[in-house]
Each structure stands twice: as C-alpha cells, then as structure tokens.
Image: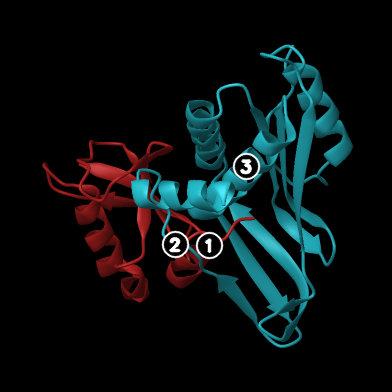
Amino acid sequence: MSFARFAVTPDPLAVDRVAAELEREAQRVGEGCGALNAFVGVVRATHKQRRVRYLEYEAFVPLALKAFAKIEAEIREEWPHALIAIHHRVGRLEIGEASVLIVAASAHRAESFQVCRYAIERVKQIAPVWKHEFFDSGDAWVEGATADAEDEVARRRAKEVACA
Amino acid sequence: MRVNVLLFARLRELAGASEFGCDVPAGATIQTVWQAAVASYPALAEFTAAVSCAKNEDFARMTSPVADKDAIAFLPPVSGG
C-alpha cells in the first residue's frame, strides 16, 4: 500500500510523516535510501517591502496532481533511482505556515539535493496554483510563469539550476 | 457546439464567474473559446498574451481543437511554491 506522493490539501503539511513514508518506499529501490532531502516553502511576512497579513492559495486540483506526476516522470528520466513526494497546501495560510513540501529520496546525498531543487523549480514553472496576498491595505494576485508543461527551454533551465 | 469554460484566480475575479457555458462553431480551437470568453468578459483581454489552458483536466495548447461538452480551463500565470 503506497501513500499519497502527490497531494493538494487544505490541511497542514506533515514533513516528518511524508519523509518517513517516502524513505520506506525508497529502501526498496536500487541501492536503497541513503539520503532524504526536504524543501519546505513557508509564508513570508513581507513581499516587495509590503507587510503581508496572510495568503490564500488556489489550485486547479486535478491538473496540479497531473503536473506533479509529470514532474516525477521527468525526474525518473534524469535520476532513475530517486523518488519524490510533492504536497501543496491551499486555502488561507498564516505567516510561517508551510505552503509547499517537497521530499526527495535517493541512495546518495548529491542526487537528493538535485532532485529536490529540480522539483521545486518545476512546480513554480508549471503547477496550476496561484498565490493571493493580503496586505494591511489591499490585496494582489502573484503572477509568475505562464504554465507551459511542454516548454523544453524551461525544463532545461530547471535542470541547470538543480545541477549547478 | 457548447463547451464549459473554467476560470481561476485573477481570471475568475475579472470575469466574476468561475464557470460558464460558451457556444463556438464547428472547427473551433481553444483560441476560439478564449476569444469568445473575452467577448463576454472584456476585462480578460489583458491576459491574452499570458494565458495558458487545459482541456478536460489535461494541459493543452491554444491551437488544440475542441469538441462538444469539453471542459476548457484558462490559467493565468502560476505562482505556486
């Protein structure tokens, strides 16, 4: 029985549980698991020198889960023995809460850093998730990349960042 | 034929609707659907150069053809993480 490697959820993200479950699965792959690498994105109190009160995240959930699965397939091409879990929070988040959790598992440490970094770069490029910031006066949607899952230039850029 | 349009985030706010039906002629592409959406909700026009799309919950291209009852989602630039 495998756990949910990919999730979009209104519930708080559970770093320890996801890391432990991924580690258990990774022990069965290749040389086994020698490294876990977790990235946790958290809600920052400022954006461009404005004080942020809280955030709301919105997602197109079925497509976000497909984007995470696509990122996993890309990782399997480059790093065949690494495993990845991607969980994204939606709804209202307070300052300091975790918005995204990425865990990479591999036999050796170098690969786990690369896979983790690649995954967060790709999440930012293609996952249909939107951040809405609320300030003391007013609010604003944050607009990053135009999501194009087939853009090979973006994919290559993510790999360069991951392997720098 | 008639397709169902889904809007998210700022697109949803600009249109004041998250979902609506849209009639398009045979041979239409997602681009045709976008043009019809902009005709109904002119405020969407500012996103014409930056929007991306999905068809029936899969990534698609603006040049993809559409069929009756397809669900076409328009996505403003993303900002997850």
Work out which residue is located at the far right of the displayed protein and give it.
A16
Q: Quadrant of the N terminus of chain A?
A: top right
- What residue does disc 2 label? B76
Residue B32: x and y in percent read: 19, 54
- Distance between the alpha carbons at the discs numbered 3 and 2: 28 Å
- What residue does disc 1 label? B9
Compare residues A152 and A15 and report the one nearer the observer.
Answer: A152
Dot 3 and dot 2 residues touching (CB under 8 Å): no
Quick check: A106 above or below A7?
above
Q: Colour of chain B?
A: red
> How does the figure colour the protein chain or chains?
by chain
Instruction: Tell me the amino acid under the disc marked 3.
Output: Gln
Quick check: A43 above or below A163?
below
Which circle, 3 or 2, is nearer the viewer?
A: 3
Image side of residue B50 versus residue A25, left or right: left
> Residue A114 got which mark?
3
